[in-house]
Image: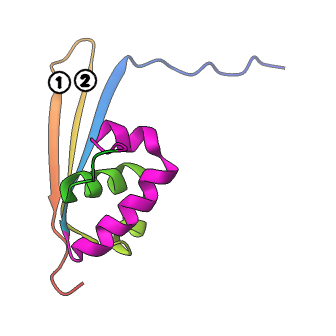
Amino acid sequence: MPAPARPLDLRVRAQRIQIDELIVDDPHEVLAHACRAARTAPDTAALLGHGPGADLTLPAAAALLCALYEPDELATMGLRFTRHTTHVTAHNQQSEPVSLELSHAPEQGR
């Protein structure tokens, strides 16, 4: 029986960064969801400035929700995506990094 083929190590390194820009449709709903999330994930909330004596600001509330939930869930919590950007950098040991940036804005009326 032949030995199984060993995977090839191409020495390729790639980094993918995804950036989603959001706007708040309903600030009260976002704050309410974030307060509930802060109780279930207090360590993450503390990193964003929420503590026993401090209330979450709207930007901190949105950041907390983005850290804990998937995009589909965020839409039901009063946050809407306005643009999605993916930045990819790839290179091997013999080449300079190649960068590619893709940007996408959802259609209006969604």
7 over 88 or under it: above or below: above
18 over 107 or under it: above or below: above
| Measured Cα–Cα span from mark 2 to mark 1 | 5 Å
- Residue type at the position of mark 2: His
40 over 9 or under it: above or below: below
Q: What label does residue 91 carry, if any?
A: 2
Q: Is residue 32 magenta?
A: yes
Q: Position of residue 25 (x, y in %)?
A: 21, 76
Q: Nearer the viewer, residue 27 or 21?
A: 27
Secondary structure type for disc 1: loop
Secondary structure type for disc 2: strand
Q: Nearer the viewer, residue 84 or 25?
A: 25
Q: What label does residue 46 carry, if any?
A: none
Q: Position of residue 9 (x, y in %)?
A: 47, 17
**Residue 28 is at least partly visible in this image:** yes
Residues in magenta? 24-52
Look at mark 1 in the image and give the residue it sits on: 97
**Residue 78 is at least partly visible in this image:** no
Q: Position of residue 32 (x, y in %)?
A: 36, 68
Furthest residue to the bottom?
A: 109
Q: Earlier in the sequence, mark 2 or mark 1?
A: 2
- In the picture, measured across the screen, residue 65 lies left or right of residue 41, that is left
Q: Position of residue 48 (x, y in %)?
A: 28, 42
Which quadrant of the view contains residue 72? bottom left
The secondary structure making up most of the magenta span is helix
107 over 83 or under it: above or below: below
Are discs 2 and 1 less than 8 Å apart at CB? Answer: yes
Q: Nearer the viewer, residue 2 or 103?
A: 103
